[in-house]
Image (cartoon, grey):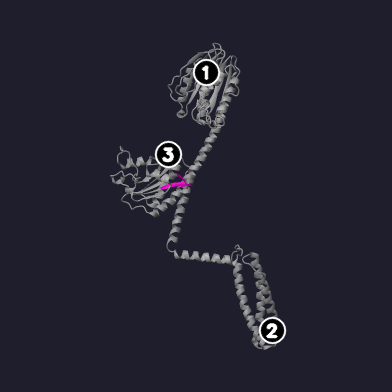
Amino acid sequence: MTLNDSFAYMPLFAVTVECVLLLLLFSTIKKRKTARISFIFYLSVIIIAAICFKSAVSNLASDNYESGNSLVTISTGLFIAGLALIAYCLVLCTFEPKKIAKLVPKSVNAKFSENENQSSILKTSDKKSSSTEFSSFDLKIMDLGRDFLTKASDSYITEDGFTDLLNYLNTSISDQIKADGGAILMIDDFEDLITVKSFAGEFPPPYKLPNDMPHKPIRIETNFKFASFPLQGNIFGEVAKAGKPELITNPAIDSRIYQNGPEDFLMCGSYIMIPMKVQDTVIGVAAFARKHDSPLFNEEELKTATLLADSAACAIKSVVTVKDIIEKNSISKEAEIASRIQELLKPAKLPVIPGIQIGSIWNPAEGVCGDYYDVLVSRKDRTSFMIGDIAGKGINSVTIMVMIRAMMRLVVNTKQSAGKILTWVNKGISGESFSTDHFGSAALINYNSETKEIELASGGNLPVIYYESETNTIKELTEVSEPIGVEKTTEYKNFVQKVKSGDIIITYTDGLVETLNDKGQQYSKDSLVRIIMQNHNSSCKDIIKAVKNDMKKFSGAVNQHDDETLLLIKIQ
């Protein structure tokens, strides 16, 4: 045995140590789940370790020259292989663990690889052109879209937030496409009109100016800022109806563009008109202009403006939707409060008054809160009946109602006539600033049980009807006059009527006789009077029941649209 052969056992022992280290590393890798370690790895390492260890021991005891030489070769090769495995395992042990995908069939991998190669070829071939440019363009649009939504969220804070949002959208898009002027027009939900809501810059009007308008820039700009257009016969309405973007580079041959000239600032250049759509619904039009001496708009600028207008439309719609929800919730809450107040104003129970019978219908419609009635024994010789119908709805209307009721209750116990009392009430209501858009009709009926006569006055369109049982005839005692709260100087006429046993005094609000059926027909005053005359010999309670049944039969399942109030006074 040579000197080299005598030391061959040393690398064999080294390989054995390497195998032990590999087994430890395999266990660590499996625990950290950074790679899959098959049991084959363990088995192979164990076999290599066993062979090397056995060969090393045999080498120490052997004197054969050939065996010793071969052992040097085998052990050296195994030692190098072990070092490579150690290096690989060290890498797997040190990087961060990742989720290991499930194995897939070879055919799927091959297909994926083929698709990936094709995609890579396409990207490489266009790397220096559209790919880089589109990515930059896309990021710019995304940044602006995000800014639009941020501005939209800020618009809820201030009273003029929505106007500020429209102006921001208008100027932002104009800046991106280098337009000389821009405008945003919104479609009115209730009228077939499209109205300018934002205007900026120099925008040669593409519509016909009024003949009497001076051709001065400030006058033209002011006209455009507050202009409204029908949805036909002009470029804005036509674009809104068509729902397609328009690039107009030669307005002279476009019949939808009107040339106002000859002044330089009125000469039409090029235009971009974009319908602002949300889920295929057009809510407005974004319009941009360049003057006749500016470069024409191009397709790339049309594309930019269209993408930005889509983002702007979403921002606008989000604000409009939230504002609608807030407004509806506010109106609903206000109507709920008003309804409670209205309910409190109604007499809890009709008083029993010697010599007369009283009957009433009071059906408030949801969210209306306009009608009220009251019965008050004001003096020994006077019982007062009041009925009112306030225009509008909500807290302001109920406030007017409360004021009218309170004023009447304060003064009906005086010796003043019904006409004078109503005149005083009108002066008090007309003096309030909030009563400009909230006025009402009211009637006051005073019954004197000692003289058997009624004294009455009415403001607005509340009728007071007298049924005379002796002649079986109907007579309207009041006249239409100015409503309460409109004109401070109005004087209300006083009426006096003698009554006898069996006579009936009738007063009602217009909601009762305007009750609709499924054909759109109104219940009418004639129907009401007919039922009362047919049942005049019955008690007030039974007359009211007959009216209710007749109204129900007439209207069927049609929803009530206004408060319905009826007050009957039958003389005994």
Tell me the kind of residue under disc 1: Ile
Neighbours of disc 2 within 10 Å: few (<14), some (14-19), many (20+): many
Q: In this view, which residue lies farthest toward the top?
A: 451
First along the sequence among labels 2 and 3 = 2
Question: What residue do we see at 68% from left, 76% from top?
Answer: 47
Secondary structure under badge 1?
strand
Q: Quadrant of residue 60?
A: bottom right
Instruction: Looking at the picture, tell me which residue is in the foreground, 288 or 273.
Output: 273
Instruction: Compare residues 498 and 408 and report the one nearer the observer.
Output: 498
x and y, in percent, of residue 68 in the image: 66, 86
Name the image quarter holding the N terminus.
bottom right
Residue 346, x across and y down, in percent:
57, 25
**Mark closer to the chain start, 1 or 3:** 3
For label 1, the residue is 445
Write down the quadrant of residue 341 in the picture: top right
State the residue position of label 2.
59
Q: Name the amino acid, label 2.
A: Asn
Q: Secondary structure at mark 3?
A: loop
Q: CA distance from mark 2 to mark 3?
A: 105 Å
The mark lying in front, picked from 1 and 3, is: 3
Per the image, is 276 magenta? Answer: yes
